Image (tube, rainbow, N blue to C red):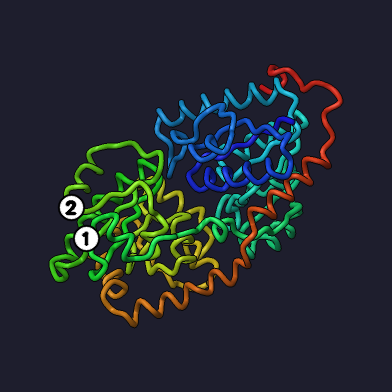
Amino acid sequence: MKVLIVAGEESGDLYGAELIRRVREIYPGVIFYGIGGRRMRAAGLECLFPAEPLSVVGLPSLSQLRLLREAWQSIREFLVDQPLRATVLIDFPGFNLRLARLCRRVGVPVFYYVAPQVWAWHRRRIKTLRRCVDLLAVVLPFEKEFFEKEGVRTVFVGHPLLDLLRPTLSRRLFCEIVGLSPHHPLLGIFPGSRPSEVQRLLPTFLETYRLLRRDHPHLQAVAVKAGGLPEDSLWEEARKEIRVLSGYQHEVLRHAEAALMASGTITLEGALLGTPMVAAYRLSGWAFFLARLLVRVPYITLPNLILGERVVPEVLQDEVTPERLAEEIRPFLFETRAREEVRHKLGRVRELLGGPGATRRVAELLVDFLRATSPPESPPPSASATH
């Protein structure tokens, strides 16, 4: 049984890999084809196009547009030429909602996992979800009611991060492995999973670290380089001052007194591990102008949205300066009371997301969806019919 699956971002690759493994345990005859990153490929994805070059924050460059077009051509040709049981779409809405429309035209059922954040912006996308998605599996507790009111068949499965966060090393052992002192405060630096994010945030995060060290010379820092990011001069410069790791992300979150982060899924990981953090969000001027017109929620980080209050400081655009970041994060690093207060508040995020088992639940839901989907009685339309 052939199933198309598409994930275009680091978090989607993580969730997709776990989903592929779980589904194949329950239903071994499923073969997954599509777009994914290194984790999905390791889980057995028959890759039609790699996900790493497709991840974009803000407006894509011309080279990124060309890559997106190449990926689209690969997927479109496969979709219209192969007898598929279903398509599984994971987040990545700019690409995947267009693909959902194509699936509807050629008669391939669509299972969407991790909903587009249309409750925050791009409300017009709800029409595509209503018309083209057969089943939507959501991971945030408020999403089920929202989408059902909009006429989308929706199931809340819980958040997969509750299953995937598995720090295993003690602080002493972690510090010994990476060459740090367990007795001095540690700053975690997470500049994002996309090259554009790293370019905009890593230099400022490093300057923030230098500023903090003027008053606290024993402060240590570790930057986590997301999988799939290319090596460049920014990382070379960072290694001259701090540790740069390509693994141990969850250990850094667990053991850092506080962290500087690009706004994204990493903020939810930090919340679930109780990491006091400051989230930064910086786009090109034009992209940020458009975002301000479109965004309809009071916060940009998932922990704050889930809690309904500003627990994680959010620093945006021109305010992302070393001085402002240092001011926001200093209490978390050096004041025990401030650190424990925010950890207590972040603990409510885990309670609101429900218990573990989301990966198992969504896999079982997908298997039931596949079993209920009849194979096509006739071959799909030719490629020319989908232009």
Q: Is residue 336 above or below residue 376?
A: below
Quadrant, the C terminus: top right
Q: Quadrant of residue 142?
A: bottom right
Q: Is residue 190 above or below residue 348?
A: above
Q: Is residue 327 above or below residue 189?
A: below
Relative to 201, is 118 on the left or the right? right
User: Callout 1 environment at 10 Å: few (<14), some (14 to 19), or many (20+)?
Assistant: many
User: Callout 2 environment at 10 Å: few (<14), some (14 to 19), or many (20+)?
Assistant: some
Q: Please state the horizontal and vertical placement of residue 31, each as a whole percent of the image.
A: 68, 32
**Residue at image x 27%, y 59%?**
176
Q: Please state the horizontal and vertical placement of residue 183, each as a whole percent of the image.
A: 24, 71
Amino acid type indicated by mark 2:
Glu
**Residue at image x 70%, y 20%?**
81
Secondary structure of the residue carrying tag 2 is loop
Residue 300, can we see it?
Answer: no
Relative to 218, is 282 on the left or the right? right
Q: Which residue is mark 2?
A: 241
Q: Is residue 6 above or below residue 215?
A: above
Quadrant, the N terminus: top right
Q: Earlier in the sequence, mark 2 or mark 1?
A: 1
Residue 107, can we see it?
Answer: yes
The one nearer the camera, 137 or 299, is: 137
The one nearer the camera, 274 or 169, is: 169
Please identify the residue farthest to the bottom as the structure is shown. 337
Q: Which residue is mark 1?
A: 209
Q: Quadrant of residue 228?
A: top left
How many marks the image carries: the answer is: 2
Image marks 2 and 1: residues in contact by CB distance under 8 Å: yes
**Residue at image x 32%, y 49%?**
245
